[in-house]
């Protein structure tokens, strides 16, 4: 089977691939039909576990696996009856493959127009994208195969706990890299199968932190990172009055940066300054550090982490000119006075005046042309905060030096 790049369908496909120990492209519809018993069994094991059951409730699966577990438990009193209920549902889906229309996800002509696929089968698709109660559509052109795989994605969902070990939301990952999908699936399936989840995740798992730490948590090797362009984390929150899906993505460049942080042992300080929010939101981590100026100055040695942030964020051409200009500024001024002055440069005209004043006093080899480059209307703001940041680092450096004397 081919990947669809739909987060639910693909996760289901990798769950099947993991279980059958078969590459995704070798999986056939007959293979799928042989998995229904195994996964129906596993589904009830998940639903019977009080904590894991919350995956179904927080992750849109509740109606697919029966709207109310309590009701289901009342009607189907034994494990086997409950399992059969799910098994019948799975088999019913796979027995309804037809050739009426092409599936909008996998592109195969195997959709059945008489088989209604609605909100209770595929999460998200129904909730937001193609279909909602307002346009009154009762079904979409999704084939039973995609539908079945989508239901299996529940086994690849990771719960997010709060401090009381309550599942408050859950996440699903999708990457373009098959190797990454396999690593993630094999680890998650191990949790689900052994139900050892609670013992393994003791602390509160912040979801955005966990996306940043993903290379470490799932042991991605260099080969994986070279062949990946993104990992997206899909977060569900299934609360009244509405349901909500949030997505965060890290790309290859970010993953290499994160890997450097891990290798250089700088992850802790990175997390301490909450820089992962800026990284994920494509906002400047340097601005975030400037906003935390006092915390940064009082903090111990985080200079290595700051070097990595600069390396990630400042293009080398820009770095040269910033370094030169900074030398020019610091040569004739007191740091504290400079800090005040630069803060007051609220617009490009003030900034230019500030630079030109210092340029006239200076003996450092900076050209007028370079100064004017800094006051480029599009980028002056970035140059300004980079100079500000260099100054803050200098202030910290000198402060540390004095303390040691
Ligand atoms: Zn399909």
Image: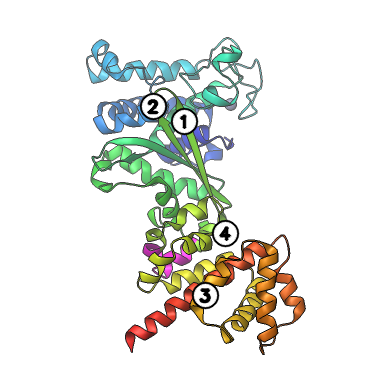
Distance between the alpha carbons at the discs numbered 1 and 2: 8 Å
The secondary element bearing badge 4 is classed as helix
- Between circles 4 and 2, the one closer to the viewer is 2
Mark 4, residue position: 253
Q: Is residue 214 left or right of residue 85?
A: right
Q: Disc 1 or 4, which lies upstream in sequence?
A: 1
Quadrant position of the N terminus in the picture: top right
Q: Are marks 1 and 2 in contact (CB under 8 Å)?
A: yes
The secondary element bearing badge 3 is classed as helix
Q: Is residue 205 left or right of residue 212?
A: left
In this rendering, the answer to whether 53 lies above or below 233 is above
- The crowd level at tag 3 (other Cα within 10 Å; few <14, some 14-19, many 20+) is many
Q: Is residue 262 magenta?
A: yes
Distance between the alpha carbons at the discs numbered 1 and 3: 43 Å
Magenta span covers which residues? 258-269
Q: Disc 1 or 3, which lies upstream in sequence?
A: 1
Residue 331 in view in this figure: yes
Distance between the alpha carbons at the discs numbered 2 and 3: 47 Å
Q: Residue at x 25, y 43 (%)?
A: 163
| Numbered badge on residue 391 | 3
In this rendering, the answer to whether 70 lies above or below 281 is above
Q: Position of residue 19 (x, y in %)?
A: 40, 38
In this rendering, the answer to whether 365 lies above or below 384 is below
Mark 2, residue position: 239
């Amino acid at each position: 089977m081919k990947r669809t790049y739909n987060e639910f369908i693909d996760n289901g496909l990798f769950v099947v691939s993991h279980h059958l120990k078969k590459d995704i492209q070798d999986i056939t519809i007959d293979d799928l039909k042989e998995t229904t018993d195994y996964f129906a069994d596993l589904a009830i094991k998940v639903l019977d576990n009080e904590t894991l059951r919350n995956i179904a409730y927080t992750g849109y699966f509740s109606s697919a696996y029966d709207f109310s577990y309590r009701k289901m438990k009342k009607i189907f009193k034994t494990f086997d009856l409950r399992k059969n209920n799910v098994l019948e549902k799975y088999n019913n889906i796979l027995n309804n493959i037809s050739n009426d229309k092409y599936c909008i996800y996998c592109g195969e002509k195997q959709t059945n127009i008489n088989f209604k696929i609605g909100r209770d089968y595929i999460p998200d698709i129904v909730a937001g994208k193609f279909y909602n109660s307002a346009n009154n559509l009762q079904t979409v052109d999704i084939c039973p195969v995609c539908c079945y795989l989508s239901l299996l994605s529940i086994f690849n969902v990771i719960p997010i706990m709060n401090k009381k070990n309550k599942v408050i939301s859950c996440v699903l990952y999708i990457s373009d890299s098959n190797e990454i999908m396999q690593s993630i699936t094999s680890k998650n399936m191990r949790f689900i199968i052994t139900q050892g989840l609670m013992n393994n995740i003791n602390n509160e798992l912040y979801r955005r932190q966990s996306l940043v730490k993903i290379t470490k948590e799932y042991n991605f090797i260099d080969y994986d990172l070279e062949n990946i362009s993104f990992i997206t984390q899909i977060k569900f929150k299934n609360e009244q009055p509405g349901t909500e899906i949030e997505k965060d993505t890290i790309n290859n460049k970010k993953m290499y940066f994160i890997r450097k942080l891990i290798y250089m042992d700088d992850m802790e300080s990175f997390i301490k300054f909450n820089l992962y929010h800026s990284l994920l939101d494509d906002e400047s981590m340097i601005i975030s550090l400037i906003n935390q100026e006092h915390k940064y100055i009082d903090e111990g040695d985080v200079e290595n982490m700051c070097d990595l942030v600069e390396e990630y964020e400042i293009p080398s051409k820009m770095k040269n000119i910033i370094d030169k200009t900074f030398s020019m500024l610091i040569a004739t001024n007191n740091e504290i006075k400079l800090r005040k002055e630069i803060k007051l440069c609220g617009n490009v005209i003030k900034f230019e005046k500030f630079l030109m004043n210092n340029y006239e006093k200076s003996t450092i080899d900076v050209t007028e042309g370079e100064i004017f480059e800094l006051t480029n209307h599009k980028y002056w703001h970035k140059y300004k905060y980079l100079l500000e940041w260099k100054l803050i680092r200098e202030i910290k450096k000198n402060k540390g030096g004095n303390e040691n004397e």
